[in-house]
Amino acid sequence: MSHSAADDTPRFKREAATWAVDAFFRAGMRVGLGTGSTAVFAVHRLAELRAQGQLLDVLGVPTSRETEALARTLGVPLTTLEEHPELDVTVDGADEVAPDLSLIKGGGGALLREKIVAQASRRVVIVVDAAKLSPTLGTRWPLPVEVLPFGWRSQALFLESLGASVTVRRDARGEPFLTDQGNRVLDCRFGPIERPEDLAARLGSRAGVVGHGLFLGLTTDLVVAGAHGVEHRARPD
């Protein structure tokens, strides 16, 4: 039976997340806990270290109800941004990473909370498997845009006017997917996004668009795991 690179993806995700928690989490920290398949491994690693008597006073801020539920199940103590509006470090995944460490995030639907937590963090550590690296954002992944349910069709037309092919994200039942905030997600295929800052500005100025998956200038550290091990990259100056 042949062995494909995809077979190793969960192992790579676990290796990257474990490395990041070991490298960046310290006693007494307030940490952001990301959402998605890679971030899950980071929460598990924090729980493992706690079981060994380490990092017992670390408090986590989850970026989704899903992560909150996992952390509570594993006994990881949680706090909120209301109690701790500044965080030491956040560990999270990404769907696509450009060479300048700009990101597309939101495949798990937590893009708004993830960005709020990232912006509240002194350090943002993104953990990925090597398949998430891309020459240009939008090459391999659609851009999620979170919109209010009210008037969402007008947002879809606006996004199409910017050159996107727009798909309404749906849940497992085929119903429109709703975020933890009760908003819809429109997945927008722009193709390679040559000027992400310009697109982010257009999206940010549009009433009814409450969030988008372009994470620009937020990543301080990238941890990539692949067939050749784990690599750490700091943000270019």
Image: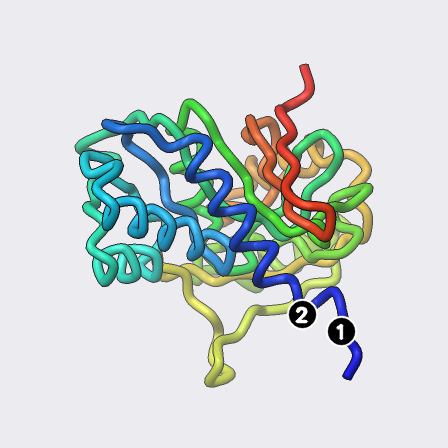
Q: Position of residue 194 (x, y in %)?
A: 81, 38
Kindly give the residue lying farthest to the front in the view shown.
52
Which residue sits at x=63%, y=36%?
200
For label 2, the residue is 7
How was this image coloured?
Answer: rainbow
**Residue 227 visible in the snapshot:** yes
**Left or right position of 204 against 184:** right
Which residue sits at x=69%, y=50%?
226
Residue 12 drawn above or below residue 79: below
Residue 166 drawn above or below residue 118: below
Q: Position of residue 82 (x, y in %)?
A: 20, 34
For label 1, the residue is 3
**Residue 80 visible in the snapshot:** no
The three-letter amino acid code for the residue at tag 2 is: Asp
**Left or right position of 23 against 75:** right
Please say if the residues under marks 2 and 1 sit with CB atoms less than 8 Å apart.
Answer: yes
> 12 and 166: which one is in front?
12
Which residue sits at x=20%, y=41%?
79
Q: Which quadrant of the structure image shows residue 183? A: bottom left
The three-letter amino acid code for the residue at tag 1 is: His
> 3 and 195: which one is in front?
3
Q: Position of residue 221 (x, y in %)?
A: 57, 30
Q: Position of residue 147 (x, y in %)?
A: 49, 55
Label 1 neighbourhood size at 10 Å, few (<14), some (14-19), many (20+)? Answer: few
Count of numbered tags: 2
Q: Which quadrant of the structure image shows residue 156? A: bottom right
Which residue sits at x=50%, y=60%?
37
The local secondary structure at tag 2 comes to helix
**Left or right position of 154 against 179:** right
The quarter of the picture where the N terminus appears is bottom right
The local secondary structure at tag 1 comes to loop
